[in-house]
Every structure is written in structure tokens, then in C-alpha cells.
Image: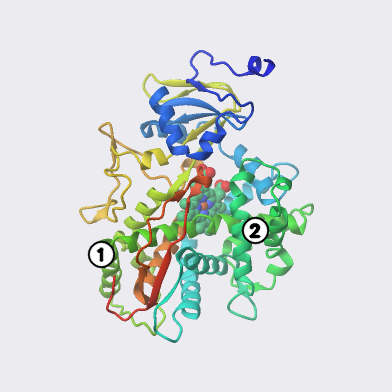
Amino acid sequence: LCILCLRRKRRQGEPPLVSGWIPFLGKALEFGRDAQAFLQDLRRRHGDVFTVHLAGKYMTFIMDPLLYPSVVKQGRQLDFHEFSDTVAPSTFGYPPVRQGFPGLSEQIARSYQLLQGEHLGPLTESMMGNLMLVLRQDHLGAGGGWRSGSMYEFCNAVMFEATFLTIYGRPASGRRHQGMAAMREDFQRFDRMFPLLIAQVPIGLLGKTRAVRSKLIGHLLPDRMSHWVVKSELIRTRSQVLEQYATLRDTDKGAHHFTILWASVGNTVPASFWVLYFLLSNPAALAAVRGEIQDVLRQSGGQFRPEEDLTLSREQLDNMILLESSISEGLRLSSASTNIRVAQEDFSLRLGGERSAVVRKGDVIALYPQSMHMDPEIYEDPQSFRYDRFIQDGRVKTDFYKSGQKLKYFLMPFGSGASMCPGRYFAVNEIKQFLSLLLLYLDLQLEPGQSQVSLDYSRAGLGILLPASDVRLRYRPSTGQQSE
Ligand code: HEM
């Protein structure tokens, strides 16, 4: 009875309130089962703005994408970092950055510029070399026959290692690090617990997760990394920044580097998987995208020779707009991130026109773009993969409409506004490079007779969803006569 008395009651001007019967958890279990269906159901019953009690937090969801700009604009009353500053340290295992480390948070935020602008060129170039290295040594070797294996493993092995080499560098005495397969396995074990860690479940309750995390951090300790060469500017700068803080232990520094590892492969690997899977499931899309890659090479006077390593300039990558559209479409279909802001005071959130919603200090304001990505009014036949959905009149299409109004935000796999992913340009480039190399150097097929792969929702809210089951891939060095 006491608990019922303490339950929050809706005040004047506040959005409809949805609380579950279970104290603390509220509606968290229903959200966790299928967030998209759960939120759509609430939207039908309560309209475009409602507050849900989820795992001890009151989250106000803004469901109409036409209202997104009011949240993304983000006045001083809405903060993004408060959430990431509490959740990231306990998830990745370093001390809270805002306590006892003056200036660290700001320096870290500034370092993310090293993923963009003039820094994108060297990163992309290095990624190309590393992709080529891993593909050539592991998949383009002698013997031209068909090979087969797990498609997720294939994408994971190539993208994980090439990204790792690009971001952290290589050993001084060798081109590749030892023990990559074991590191990938540990990463996957950690990643399976990631949703629980983000939900602030204590790591001690999660079996061997603490030991697995320590092993991963152990690969990235300053002493170990000091023997590596050709590191990215991001990691060199971050290492220097971390060195300024005498109270950070080596394991804390390793944990900071581990955060970047998660950010750089945690979404990129499943995104690469999905785009490849959709292309291989759609012969017309595959032929068109492969044709575009070959055209771009021809037009810039280059010629593809399987025995030679390929480099693709930034301009060539920019010109692959069908490939880019396929990646956008793959991201639209597979991403389920929540964009979160925390109210810094009690205030009335203006939603445009006469509309507003009263929120309380500490409440979370959330956007769940998957509902927009799956809205048939915005995207016709939203469940299907249309590789050219983001192309119009031979250019990248950016006008999408809801209720007759042009949407400012229509595709949000990378978040929005202040919390937008700083690695997004690099991510799209590396997926482009990975797919270009695959489609040029290999004949690829899904093994026949496999059922369609669906999304695993256990990671809903946190980025690109993983496949619920694996799929078998067949491939061989290209014969020049594509057999799809
Ligand atoms: C943050 C998506 C690839 C670095 C984020 C966020 C999202 C996201 C949704 C959080 C935004 C928020 O909380 O609102 C993705 C997707 C990727 C990808 C879908 C691939 C398809 C990358 C890559 C890197 C990277 C390749 C780096 C090499 C980061 C970093 C942050 C971040 C450092 C944290 C930024 C901050 O705390 O301010 N990403 N990301 N991401 N991403 Fe990415």
C-alpha cells in the first residue's frame, strides 16, 4: 500500500503517465521484449507524447518526428552528458570523469574531432590498407574454390581486426596482432552483457563479465600500446590526455581505450553484416551496386586487377551513391537507438505551436527513431529493403515527409544534435570500403535453403541490432563472372 501511495501522480500539463504495477521496474520488461511494438501501442492509446516508468526512471517519449527538432535543439534545460557520464564509467570500468578529473570530459569530447574533417583522410586510407591486408591474407589466398562459413563471423573477423589496426596501430615488429580471434570472442561475451550493464545491473551479478572486461582492458594498457606503431591521431591524443591525470591508474586508462573499441566496432560490425545480407538477398540490388563500384573505378581511369591491391580515394567513395543508399537503408532497417536527454530543472518543454509538455528535473526525454524508420507514411513498404530508397534523380535523397511536412530528421542511426556519433563519417566510409572490396574481389552467395534472418531485440535502444540467427555465406575469389 505504501508503495502505491508513493507512486508518481500526473500533474497538470504533464503528458499521460504509464506506470507498471511492478515497483522500480515499471514497464521495463515489456519495453525490453519488443520496444517498437510496446511504444507503438502506447502511442495509439496516449498520443505522440507520454511518460513511461522504466527501471526507476521516468522517460517522456516524443513519438512524432515533426517534434524531434524541439528536443534536438536542446536548450540549457536538457543535457545529454549527465546520462553518458554516469552510465559509461560503470559499463566500461573507469572512474566517473567529472569527479576529481578537472577538464578531462572536455578534452575527451574535443578529441572526437580527430575522427572527422581533415583527419578522415588518413583514417580512411589506413583502413583501406588494413582491410586489404586481412582480406588478402585470410580470404583471397591460394586455391580458388568455394569456401563457406558464418556470415556474421566473416564480417566480424575482417571489420574488427581492420578497425582495430586502424585505430590502435600495429605491433612494431609485425603487421598484425596475435590473439585477435580470442579478443573478438571476449568482446562478444562482453557485448552480450552490454544491455544489462547499461541498465546499471552491477557487474558482479553478471557471471564472468568482470573478468572478461579486465582481459579486454588488459590488451589496451599504456605499456602494451606503447610498443605499437601507426596509431590513429585519436588514440595518440587520448593517450596524452590520460597521461596528464596522475590519479588515473593504468587499468583506468586501458578502460578509457576500451570504450573507443566498443564504440568503433560495436555497431559497425552488425551494420556491415546487415548491408551485406540485404544485398546478397536482393540480386538486382547486388548487381546495381557492384556495377556502380566498377563504373566509379572506370570513370576515374583506374582498373581493377585481382592480383593488385586496391585503393579508393575519398572522392571515389563519395561517388558511390547507390552503395551509400544501400548502407542508409541497411541502417534504417537495423538500428534501434534511443536518443536521450535529461531535464536539468522542472520546466515546460515547448514542442512547437501551442504544444508543450511539463517535465520534472531528472526526467529523461527520449526519442526512439526506429518508430520513424518504420513509419509507412514516411517510408513506403517500410519492412522491405530498397537499395535505392535514398536516391532521387541521380542524387542523394533528403526529402521525406510526414503529414505533408518535410522532415528535418528522417534517418537517425547515429543519434542527433549534441550527442551525435562523431565516428559517423568514418563508419560509413569503412562500410563502403569493406563492401567494395568484397564485391570486387569475391563472388559471394548466401547458401541456398536458409530462412530469413530477423532482428534480435535484446539490444533495443542501444544501436544496431544483432541478427537473431546466423546465416551461411559461400564465397570464392572472383572469376569475373558473377554468379548471383
Ligand atoms: C556515439 C552510432 C560507428 C565513435 C554514438 C551514438 C550512436 C552511435 C547512436 C550515441 C549517440 C547518443 O547517445 O545519442 C554509431 C553507429 C555506428 C557507429 C550506428 C556504425 C554504423 C562509430 C565509429 C566510431 C564511433 C566507427 C569511432 C571510430 C563514437 C563515439 C561516441 C559514439 C566516440 C560517443 C560520443 C560522445 O560521448 O560524445 N555512436 N556509431 N562510432 N560513437 Fe558511434
Q: Nearer the viewer, residue 24 or 290?
A: 24
Tell me which amino acid carries mark 1.
Answer: Ala
Q: Residues within 10 Å of mark 2 (few under 14, many from 20)?
A: many
Residue 422 in view (yes/no): no
In-front residue for pair 213/472: 472
Q: Secondary structure at mark 1?
A: helix
Which of the 4 image quarters holds residue 190? Answer: bottom right
Taking the spot 69% from the left edge, 53% from the top edge, the residue there is: 209
- Most extreme residue toward the front, as rendered? 449
Q: Secondary structure at mark 2?
A: helix
Where is residue 166 shown, x and y percent of the image?
Answer: 54, 68
Image quarter of the N terminus: top right
Q: Residue furthest left?
A: 393
Residue located beneath label 2 in the image: 257
Position of 454 compared to 479: left or right?
A: right
Colour approach in the figure: rainbow
Relative to 450, does residue 391 appear above or below in the rendering?
above
**Residue 363 placement (x, y as % from top left):** 57, 28
Say whether residue 384 is visible: yes
Q: Position of residue 291 (x, y in %)?
A: 26, 69
Q: Residue at x 39, y 30 (%)?
A: 67
Q: Going from the N terminus, do you reach mark 2 or mark 1 first?
A: 2
Left of 436 or right of it: where is 424?
A: right
Q: Which residue is mark 1?
A: 288
Q: Is residue 162 left or right of residue 284?
A: right
Report how far apart the C-alphas of labels 2 and 1 lie in the structure.
39 Å
Q: Residues within 10 Å of mark 1 (few under 14, many from 20)?
A: some
